[in-house]
Amino acid sequence: MQVHKPFPARDRDLCRFHADDYVAFLRSITPETQQDHMRQLKRFNVGEDCPVFDGLYSFCQTYAGGSVGGAVKLNHDQCDIAVNWAGGLHHAKKCEASGFCYVNDIVLAILELLKQHE
């Protein structure tokens, strides 16, 4: 078994599925600024079961980057099996968080796999 530290997903990686304004919101929101963005919090379903916390965007970049990176390795025959133990956060929608899922790493990994596999 090989263990790899994921490269953080970039905005353009996340925007392959998620809306630009939603990704920009995730990048900018912090616990200190959330009171100034109540309308956006409601619009993007961030708050109750998808709280704002320190490092939220970095968290999203890391877990999404792990899944996309695993898919890249599969596409380039660098492994036979790839597992992202931090991934699987599939409830996120194009413009909305859901169920503690902020970005849908599963969809992002599938989009990567579709580059090589039908």
Image (tube, rainbow, N blue to C red):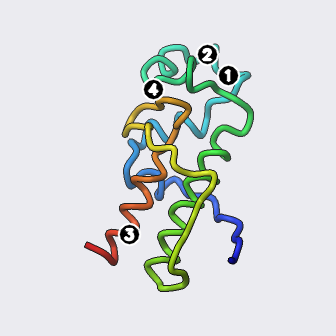
Say which amino acid is labelled 1. Thr
Quarter of the figure that contains the C terminus: bottom left
Q: Are circles 3 and 4 on residues that touch, CB within 8 Å?
A: no
Three-letter amino acid code at the position of disc 2: Asp
Q: Are marks 1 and 4 in contact (CB under 8 Å)?
A: no
Which residue is most to the bottom?
A: 77
Q: Which residue is mark 3?
A: 113
Please tell me which residue is depicted at 38% across the width and 42% down the height of the picture: 19
Amino acid type shown at disc 3? Leu
Q: CA distance from mark 1 to mark 4?
A: 15 Å
- Helix, strand or loop at mark 4: loop
Give the residue at x 43% y 37%: 91
Badge nearest the viewer, 1 or 3: 3
Q: CA distance from mark 4 to mark 2?
A: 14 Å
Question: From mark 3 to mark 4, how far is it between C-alphas?
Answer: 27 Å
* Residue 36 numbered tag: 2
Comparing 97 with 3, the one in front is 3
Picture disc at residue 44: 4
What residue would you read off at disc 1? 33
Q: Residue at (71%, 66%) from the top-left corner?
A: 5
Q: CA distance from mark 3 to mark 2?
A: 39 Å
Local secondary structure at mark 2: helix
Please rate how many residues cluster around mark 2, counting C-alpha atoms within 10 Å: few if below 14, some from 14 to 19, many from 20.
few
